[in-house]
Every structure is written in structure tokens, then in C-alpha cells.
Amino acid sequence: MSDITLLDGGIGQEVVRRAGDRPTPLWSTRAMMDHPGLVAQVHRAYFDAGATIATANTYAILRDRLVKEGIADRFEALQSAALDEAQQAARGRGRVAGAIGPLVATYRPETHPPPDIAVPQYAEVARLLAPRVDLILCETVASLTHGRAILDGARAAEKPVWIAFTLDDEDGTRLRSGEAVDQAAQIAVEGGAEAVLANCSAPEAMGVAIDIFARTGLPCGAYANGFTQITKDFLKDSPTADALTSRRDMGPEAYADFAMDWLDRGATILGGCCETTPAHIAEIARRLRAAGHRIV
């Protein structure tokens, strides 16, 4: 049987849900500011469910996003607060991944800055994360340009770098930019990534991407979202999560069925993204143990 790394599930959506506040463009960053300790509570719930990595709540803590809210001066303090909560929860239980989300906007490859602007910004985040994380997780990479830039920047951390691409929900051979996943896989290899994943896309799109990623020889995997679709309202400037609708057919058992298929296709890294919960991770952990796999 195999050694499988089990990521956590959705952090941002779970934090916002537990906070009970109205979603804002700052998303889980605002919830963390208003409810200290809540993110650590979510991390602990995922470790209790069987996860072995806490993904720090740093995805949206980027200078360009904070400028819009007039709090750019809190950039380093917010990064530190998110890392504090992840480290507290992970102590003696697992590793910490420092998440880096897309500059400007999620799912919007056309808004991504050119490399001469993007690479230094990603590098700044990577250097801040480096002393306090075990690996850098570049998330929701929507285009080839984005992939090259974030890998170039993340190398500044001098830590293992994993890259996760977001896919066309209806065609797992394509990124959200429309570019080919096999080209993205090659960028992961050439850019020095130590693992290549698919994330924040429909579960149905993940399998074919894993088939492609597995051919690179890198550890690969997937963590899907539970949205019905990415709506036009969410693709506007400064969106909030209430523009999206969760799927009613993607409970823990249904989601774990997909995860076990990804495993059969060669995945060794599994987890969940937005709208997945500790219950989803617990069901994957149960299935893995029942099949004789070791969660590492």
C-alpha cells in the first residue's frame, strides 16, 4: 500500500462559516482579524479529522488586496498572525504549508500582472513565510504565465515548493486560462516544483489532470472545491463568497469517492478546497486506512 499525504480541507470558507459574519472581499483575512483563535480552531479540527498538513491562512494576505481595504500597513502583522495560528495547531501533529494565492484576483488569469511586477511580490511573501513553514503551496494558479511567475518568486523561500493549478470545471485538460494542463505540468517540472496538484475546481475535472501530472514523475494530487460553478458575479472586482453556491451532491461520501479515484490514477496527495469540511477529510482518512494506506 502507499504513503499518502492528507491535506486539510477548505480553510477560508470554514472560517467564515464558523465566524457567522457576512462575507467580505477580505474573506477569511477579515474573519481572522475579528475572531482571533478561530483559524487555529479550524486547523485543529482538520488534524483531528486525519490531515497531516495545516495550510496557513495566508492565501489572500497580499499587498494588492490589502491596499483596496486601506490596511496595507498590516501586511506583515497579518502574515504573522496567520502563521501563529497554523503553528499552534500543528505543534506535534503535522507540517505547516505557507499558502500563496494569486495576485489581483482568483480565477482571473487576464488580470495577473506581468512577471517583472509579479515575481518580486511573490518572492516577498515567500521570504516572509519561509522561516515558519515546512513548504510553500502556490495555490489556484490559473495560467502558464502565473505558474512561471509564482514558481520564480516562491524559490526565494528556499523551501520545498508545491504548485496547484485551477482547471476548467468542464475540461480537466485545460487551465482556467484555456491553456493546456500538459504545458502546466512541464512548467512545474522546469520551475523546480516538488509536487504538482490540481485545486479549487470541480471534482469531475481532476481525474484527467492527475493522469497528466502523474507522467511528470513528480508527486501529484488534487483538492477540489464544492461549488456548483464559478459565477459571473464572482469574476467581478472585489467579489464575496456569497456570489457562489455550494453543491448539495458533494457530501463527504461523494467527495471521498472522487478522492479514491484520484488515488487509483496515481495521486499521493489528497485534500479538499472551498466548501469541503473536516467531515470530508475524515471520510477520506477513513477510506485510506480501510484500504491499508498510511497517512503521512
Image (spheres, rainbow, N blue to C red):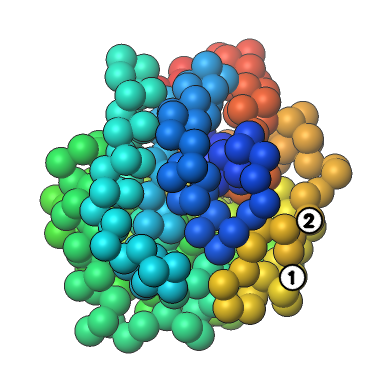
**Which residue lies at the image location 67% right of the left edge and 70% below the top edge?**
234
| Disc nearer the start of the sequence (2/1) | 1
Question: Do callouts 2 and 1 mark residues in contact (Cβ within 8 Å)?
Answer: yes
Residue at x 26%, y 62% (from the top left corner): 73
Please name whichever residue, 7 or 56, is drawn nearer the observer in this view of the structure: 56
Q: Nearer the viewer, residue 22 or 244?
A: 22
Drawn side of residue 181 relative to residue 262, left or right: left
Q: Where is residue 217? Give x, y as percent.
A: 37, 50
Labels in figure, total: 2
Q: Secondary structure at mark 1?
A: loop
The residue identified by callout 1 is 231
Mark 2 nearby-residue class (10 Å; few <14, some 14–19, many ≥20): some
The answer to whether 114 appears left or right of 266 in the picture is left
Q: Position of residue 296 (x, y in %)?
A: 40, 23
279 vs 271: above or below? above
Q: Amino acid at mark 1?
A: Thr
Tag 2: residue type?
Answer: Thr
* Residue annotated with mark 2: 245
Q: Is residue 147 above or below residue 30?
A: below
- The residue positioned 56% from the left and 63% from the top of the image is 25
Task: Give above or below for 257 relative to 68.
Answer: above
Q: Position of residue 82 (x, y in %)?
A: 35, 41
Q: Is residue 227 left or right of residue 79?
A: right
Residue 292 showing in the rendered view: yes
Q: Is residue 14 above or below residue 59?
A: above
Q: Callout 1: 10 Å neighbours few (<14), some, many (20+)?
A: few
Measure the alpha-carbon separation of dots 2 and 1: 9 Å
**Residue 225 visible:** no
Residue found farthest to the right: 248
Helix, strand or loop under label 2 = loop
169 left or right of 143 in image: right
Which label is found at residue 260? Answer: none
